Structure formats: C-alpha cells, structure tokens
Image (tube, grey):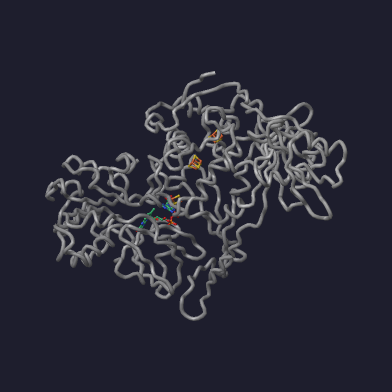
Amino acid sequence: MVFCDVYATLVLSSKNRMVNVVMPLPIFYLFFNFGAATDILAVICLKSEDGVIMLKLPKQELMSLISELRRLGFEVIAPTRSNETVRLAALSSPSDLETDYIRIINSPRDFLLPSREPLFRYRSTATVTSYGLKIRFPTVEGPCPVTIVPEYTPPKVKIAFFGIHPCMANSIRYLDKVMLSEPADPYYKARREDMFVAVLECEEGDQYCLCKTVESYKVPEGYADLMIRRGGDGFLVRSRSKRGDELLASLKRGEVAGKPKDLVPRLKEEYAFDRTDEAGIDERDASEYVGACTLCASCTVTCPTCYCSDIEDKFSLMDPSNVERSRVRMSCQRRCYSMIAGGTTFLNTKEARFKWRLKHKFPFSERAYQLVGCVGCGNCIAFCPARIDFRKFLGRRVA
Amino acid sequence: METKTLRLTLINWRADFLPGQFVQLLLPGVGEAPFCITSSPSDPKHIELTILRRGLVTTASQYIRPGDAVGIRGPLGRPFPLDRFHGRDVLLVATGIGIAALRSLILYILENRKKFKEVTLLYGARFPEDLVYRDEIKSWAEHVKVMVTLSKATEQWSGLRGRVTDHLKEVSLHKDLVAVVCGSPAVMESITNELIKYGLSSENIYVSLERHMKCGIGKCARCLIPGGLLVCKDGPVFSASEISIKAIGE
Ligand SMILES: Cc1cc2nc3c(=O)[nH]c(=O)nc-3n(C[C@H](O)[C@H](O)[C@H](O)COP(=O)(O)OP(=O)(O)OC[C@H]3O[C@@H](n4cnc5c(N)ncnc54)[C@H](O)[C@@H]3O)c2cc1C
Ligand code: SF4
Ligand code: SF4
Ligand code: FES
C-alpha cells in the first residue's frame, strides 16, 4: 500500500467471535486512540512489507511470555544464574530468567539428548543365590521366562527454550541432522517435535566466541519462533513463526519499535579457517596444543553438538532380573571410545583425539550433512582447564 | 582362540540379509555386541554367528545352550557388492577371526559357483587350534582353491607356513581380480598395500572394517572413520578406493 508500509494484525472479539484483521499501522493507532466498538484482544504481530517489525517490551512483559508458555503446557528451559555460572535449567519462576550473560555451561543438547537416557527395560532370568549371581539365559520352550517388555515410552514433553543465544539455536539444527536422519531417533524426535525456541540475540561475545567464523550468529528458518534483543531499558521482540505470532498475541502491552536490522555481534577475536581440509588437520603438528591436555573431556562435555554415546545394560544385584538399557554420553577423548576387541585403539594419543574432535566438527560433518558441527560457542576453549584454543591450531587470526 | 558358532532360529520373522552384513546380538542381562552373519543368505530363517571369546558378551555367549532365547537387531550395514564379483576371479584373504566375515560370502559362492571364475581362499592363523571351521574348510576345498597357512605351525602341520603375505605370490594376481580382505586392522592394511603393489587397483580390493559399534544405525558416532564415513551405515564393507588405506589400520 502506498501510504504505509507497516501493517498490524489485530485479534478483535466481536459478539464472542474472534476476528483477525490486518490493517495499515495508522488505522491500527486509530483503534487504540478512539477505542473501537470491539475489544482489542491483542496485537498479534506487526508486519512491514519486507518483513516483521519489532515490539518493545519491558522485562516484566517478557516474563509474561514465559508464564504464557507454561500455561500452554511447555516446560520452559532458560538461562539461570547461580554464582558465576549461567546454565540452562527448567525455570521455576519467570523471574529466574537471566538475560545478561554471554556463555552457558550446558546447552539444549542436555535436554533434547540427555547424558543418560533409559531406552527400555526388560526382565531377564538372572537370580542371585548365596553362591553368587547366576544368569541363566531364557529359553524358548515353555513359558518364556524372559519378558523383553520394551517399556518403550518416548518422552512426552513440550520444551520451550527461552533466551538461548543464536549459536545454541544452531546447535539444535545440527543435532536434528544427526538424530532425525533416517532412521530417526524416536526419543529425540519426541522431545524435539513440539519444541518452542525464543532466541536472545547477542550484541557482544567474549574472547572465546567464534560465531562469525562459522556464521552461527544467524538463526536459520525453523529454529526460532521469537527473536529477542535488548533495546533501551527493555527488549525488542519479533516473531518468526506462526507460534511466535500466537504467543505475542497474549501480550497486554508493547509498543511498535520499527524494523529490525541484522545484529552482528562484536567479537574480541576473529579467526578464519578452512572447514573441509581433513588432510591439513592431519598434517599439522598439534603437540604444542595438546601438551597441557588433561584428558578431562570438558571440551566434549560442554560442546552443544557432541552427541556420541554408549549403550549400557544395567541391573541391581537386589533385583538382577530387572534390566534397564540406557544410552549414556561418550567422548572421543576417552580411550574406550575407539578401542575394539583385540586391543586395537584407533585414537591412542592425545594428539589423535584432539584432531579427531576437530575432524568430526569440520570436514566429517561437512561431508555428511553439508553443515559444520561447530556452532562457534567457544565452550570447548572457555571450559578447558588448559585453555587449549583450537582456533589457533585450525586457522589464523584475522581480527 | 576360543570360538563358538551359534545357530539361531528366528521366531516369527525372517532376515533377508546378504553376505557382509552384521547383526547386534543381545544377551539378556549381559549386553549387546555386533557380529557378522556367517551363514548363507539362502536361508533367511536362520542366522549363524561365530564368536571369539573376548569380553563380557563374547564370554557369556560361550555358555549359551540349545533352546536359549537371545535377541537380534539387524541385519545392519552394507553387504559385499556381489554383482561386481560375478564373472570374475575372486581372491578371499582372511586372518584369525576375520574368516567369520567371509564365511557367508564363501557359502554364497559355493551355492552359486558358476557365477564366479577362479576362487581362491587364503586363510592365515597362528596355531593349528586357532583355525575356525576346520572341518568345513575341507569341503570348501572341493569347489574353490583353499590355502591355509600357519605362522606358528607345529611340527606335525603339513600345510603352508608363514603369514598370508608370504603366499600372495602363489596366487595369480591380475588386474581383473577382485580381492576381499578381512582380519585385524593392521593386517588388513598391510595386505591391501601388498595387493596394490602386485598391481591390483584399489577399487577391486574390499575390506570389512571393525569399530566399537553401539547403535548400528548412525546415531552414536562410535564407528566414524577418517573421511567421516560411518562403518555401520556406509560399511562395514568398503572398497579400498572409498577410504584412505591408512584408515584401515589406523
Ligand atoms: C561389524 C562387526 C562385525 C564383527 N563380527 C565379529 C564376528 O563375526 N565374530 C567375532 O568374534 N567378533 C566380531 N566382532 C567383534 C565383536 O563385536 C567384539 O568382540 C565384541 O563386541 C566384544 O564384546 P564383549 O562384550 O565381549 O567385550 P567387552 O567386554 O565389551 O570388551 C572387550 C573388548 O571389546 C571391545 N568392544 C566392546 N564392545 C565392542 C563393540 N560393540 N564393537 C567392537 N568392539 C567392542 C572393547 O573395546 C574391548 O577391547 C565384530 C565387530 C564389528 C564391529
Ligand atoms: S567445537 Fe567448541 S566452539 Fe564449536 S560448538 Fe563445540 S564447544 Fe562450541
Ligand atoms: S566423536 Fe568426539 S567430537 Fe564427535 S560427537 Fe563424539 S565426543 Fe564430540
Ligand atoms: S554404530 Fe553408532 S554410528 Fe555406527
């Protein structure tokens, strides 16, 4: 339309019917100013011809979005602070939301793909006698004493990540590539399906962030329902999905704050490296980097995209017939990751393991999914007790 | 080497598998481990596994008695590309328990003998008692050329002595031959290199790789190999041209 490039969608209630009305912004203000004959339920979203525009909210209203998500049945997972550490946790109160942080120690992975996940239980025929544990295998004759009751219940949860940074939203995209490729993992899928994501954009990173190198400060389509950024003494919010529109519709107030410009975070250091060069990683000498490595595996524990796992069949000696199979997180930094029967250990030096992690993040993932496995959060550097900085090994500093 | 071959009857299902594929064997209360299917694909109601005693599952499986119930997940993985073997000379090289990965293929070849030209099995072990399928091998020898060599032979041993690589020169190796190599990683790497030296192209050399597999369906990253391939999904059978030869033994 010629006279205006900003439109508002209103939900009006008229004789108990809900009506959606799209109108140019000046007319929208008329409704506000003169009070329409109908009740304005909410401003759902404001659209300009070339995209969405933002709403300005005080923090109180931001927290009301959390309450609304909880009312809709979501478990809201958001950054919370205890002492110096900020971590994602299920919010018990919206006021626990921490919005002033750069780095979280855990990641959405820990909720979508928990570090220990029971897959199913089954009953075996093991018994404990005074002579010790006796495992008799079940037989097929007669009533089969083993019941593999695959108590298979994909988790029923609706998770809303609220206030995660763009790198973390990107990590979900990588996990999707792995876990939802055929055959899709039913446990992950069940958690993932109803997920809601409200991204808190970053203005500034710390000395470990590398999101500009891997371009993960942008959030691709489908990985954010809401985009939130700081603005003045409040927050600027825009919707990026239908569910985001619906959530904003619950707001009581909010003022239009113009169109968003791309927000590129300021980083302290910037690096450039080749993401596909496997041979280059092999050839380079990593001894100066891994010398101080303590093999603690923090790099893989805090990485939002590390997913590798082990399978455990476990029972208690008190009830040995009741077996639980779980998937537990593994790490390529551990020796048993790559040991096969016969004793061959493919990754048998610190250097081989350090390089393996980088090969998996970059060339291997590029090849398998056309997507790098590093989302640039910098956790593997920040939480490394020896501060081993893979960016320096892989590339060169450019800023 | 302590090995045991289990013959499993599938209840209410059939496994349509091809030589080279594997299954995950579940022993209730003990755990799960991957094993190559060693029986012939012409019988989808049965699966045979040959298991070398090593750790938890492999030891427990030595105590299985007829009639016991176990669980199977599979068939998993990519089989040998049989159509690429048809009408050609085939060399099968196995060391140690590696022979298990080849038995299904050998049985397939015996049942479809006319589809293949000259077939040679070169099988190496250390001690005479390490030889798996000792009695069966005699009947295989009626249809294909079999060479068994022992690196730690006793005095009574009348067959070949030394490592398999010592006997490669006795096989007529030529460009059009397809070779399949199974054994420990280091041995597979050295045999592959040896075969390339004899003029075989890496596309015609196949290996079956072993990694510490857990899920078998591409979700646990335990079977990643250099190049970013997954042994459980992209393999376990690879031609030496698809992977770096160092990756075989690394
Ligand atoms: C595709 C494939 C086919 C195989 N085929 C055969 C076969 O036909 N016959 C045979 O005897 N063996 C075969 N193996 C090896 C067999 O899987 C291991 O011997 C077995 O997993 C060891 O299990 P365990 O519980 O007895 O050992 P554990 O007590 O768990 O450990 C003993 C040793 O085995 C290694 N190991 C444990 N789990 C695995 C695993 N899932 N994969 C590989 N190594 C592991 C450990 O690192 C350790 O070195 C195959 C392996 C693969 C990957
Ligand atoms: S590799 Fe390091 S920087 Fe990249 S996503 Fe993992 S923890 Fe973050
Ligand atoms: S192999 Fe290493 S880098 Fe890859 S997912 Fe596992 S722990 Fe992370
Ligand atoms: S065995 Fe899990 S990815 Fe291959």
Residue at far bottom of view: A142
Can you say which quadrant of the picture contains the C terminus of chain A?
Answer: top right
Q: Position of residue A204 (x, y in %)?
A: 65, 25
Residue at far front of view: A2
Residue beneath the point at 51% across and 76% down: A144
Q: Position of residue A23 (x, y in %)?
A: 74, 40
Query: Quick check: A378 above or below A106?
Result: above
Judging depth in this view, the residue of A29 and A285 nearest the camera is A29
Give the quadrant of residue A52. Answer: top right
Query: Quick check: A67 above or below B148?
Result: above
Judging depth in this view, the residue of A222 and A245 nearest the camera is A245
Judging depth in this view, the residue of A155 and A106 nearest the camera is A155
Give the quadrant of residue A127. Answer: bottom right
Residue beneath the point at 77% across and 41% down: A43
Is A307 displayed left or right of A38 in the figure? left
Q: Position of residue A169 (x, y in %)?
A: 61, 39
Residue A135 appears in the rendering: yes
Q: Position of residue B127 (x, y in %)?
A: 24, 56
